[in-house]
Amino acid sequence: MTRTGCSTPEEADAIDYLSEKYSTTEVAKRLGRSNNFIRQRLKLAELIEGFKVFVHNGDMTFSLGVDVAPFASEEQQMMLETIGRRLTMTSGIAWNEDYEDPNSDVAQMYQSPCENNESHILTYMKPLKFEHQPGTHWNYSTGETDLVGILIQKATGKSLADYLSEKIWQPWGMENCAYWLADECSNLNMGGSGLSASLRDYARLGTLMLNSGKHEDESIFSEEWLDDATSLLYETNDQGGGYGYLWWRFKNGSYAAVGVFGQMLYIDPHKDLVIVQIAAWPKASSDNLTGGRQAFIEAVHRVID
């Protein structure tokens, strides 16, 4: 994970203490920091606390690679690096995302019987081994995104559907209700798939990204996260394309969310362009259909240039 600014342990303690008594603006003034820095530090503290509970309950100890207690500042940074590896698909855990192979991890991850109220993906991933040193190798894994989804729900105390509704769907004025599949064992929404929304509302999501996450002068995303999410953090092909935080990044600066069977949300901030495709391809992935879609995107670029 790219660090954009860290507080010392003493300053972190001061922020936590002062925030209980004073407003964010007053805390920033007393410590000589920006309001945004203080807000992000407080959000970080909430995330760490949620992650601590998450791990303490035994849900994710298999993939941490760090001692989770006690939670000193250095260990918090290691924990954040672990979260970052989930977001960038660089955890190093062995995973097969072959949609044509019925025995691949992506095909088998929801097939095992429920173990109490534990999510399918946690039950499935616990026995998996590290194939690479964490942070050194990129490998696409729906399992990683499922883990991120569980982390968000544990940290916020809200389902992904409720959190999306509160932070984006209602403030941004989406036209239609959206639906998000839930795991049959835990009843938690699946972070790696299962969000169903209308074409126009997906386009509105793209417009939100074009607008840097701003709604009525309020930023939904931090500037640092947005920069990292849509940057080329890991190169994944010979054409100069790669991956950010759960976004595919292309050589020309555009980026996209791409799903199986033809789903796509494509954004080019330099052209103020959003393209959405909702599809039901006969196969999860197809070089021929992907090539046709790319030709369409290039044709749109030629028209607007």
Image: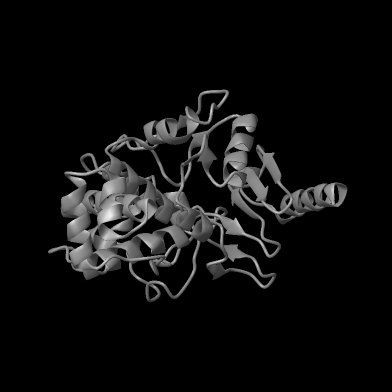
Left or right: residue 137 compared with residue 5: right
Location of residue 45 in the rendering, given as x and y in whole percent from the top left corner:
25, 53
Location of residue 139 in the rendering, given as x and y in whole percent from the top left corner:
49, 65
Q: Is residue 20 above or below residue 4?
A: above
Location of residue 207 in the rendering, given as x and y in whole percent from the top left corner:
62, 40
Location of residue 164 in the rendering, given as x and y in whole percent from the top left corner:
43, 35
- Please give the name of the residue rendered at 42% of the width and 45% of the height, measured from the top-left corner: 191
Image label count: 0
| Residue reaching furthest to the right | 303
The foreground one among 215 and 167 is: 215
- Please give the name of the residue rendered at 43% of the width and 35% of the height, measured from the top-left corner: 167
Left or right: residue 1 compared with residue 80: right
- Please give the name of the residue rendered at 30% of the width and 53% of the height, measured from the top-left corner: 28
Quarter of the image for residue 274 reads top right
Left or right: residue 183 compared with residue 168: left
- Residue 173 visible, this angle: yes
